[in-house]
Amino acid sequence: MDEAALRDTVADVARTTTVPVVAQRLSTVTAADRIVVMDAGRVRAVGTHRGLVAADALHAGPAATQFLATDG
């Protein structure tokens, strides 16, 4: 399954239930209602993709290197 198909499947299921997703590629979770950023086993930040890019270097750094839109 390619990444786009995975995102579509998760989005379909998420319409009716909570779906926890663990991902290294941020494009997988940019549309999430809530993203939890962890580092060394600790929660470092919680928010939306847009909010985390603006406020959290742990999320913003990978977002920039993975060529993601920061307004999504």
Image: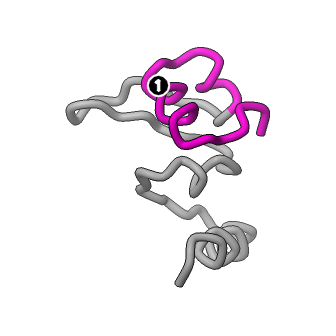
Q: In which quarter of the image is residue 7?
A: bottom right
Residue 17, image x, y percentages: 64, 68
Q: In this view, does 37 lie above or below 22?
A: above
Q: In the image, is residue 65 part of the stretch drawn in magenta?
A: yes
Q: Quadrant of residue 69?
A: top right
Q: In the image, is residue 39 part of the stretch drawn in magenta?
A: no
Q: Is residue 1 above or below residue 12?
A: below
Q: What is the basis of the colouring in this image?
A: one colour
Mark 1 Cα-neighbour bin, 10 Å: few <14, some 14–19, many ≥20:
some
- Looking at this rendering, what residue extends furthest in the left direction? 40
Q: Is residue 12 above or below residue 39?
A: below
Residue under the point 71% across and 32% down: 70
Residue under the point 35% across and 34% down: 38
- Looking at this rendering, what residue extends furthest in the right direction? 71
Q: Quadrant of residue 14?
A: bottom right
Main SS of the magenta segment?
helix
Residue 43, image x, y percentages: 35, 29
Horizontally, is 39 left or right of 31 in the view?
Answer: left
Horizontally, is 15 left or right of 45 in the view?
Answer: right
- Looking at this rendering, what residue extends furthest in the top direction? 55
Magenta stretch in the rendered image = 50-72
Q: Name the residue under label 1.
A: 45
Residue under the point 54% across and 26% down: 60
Residue 64, image x, y percentages: 57, 31
Residue under the point 59% across and 62% down: 18
Residue 15, image x, y percentages: 75, 68
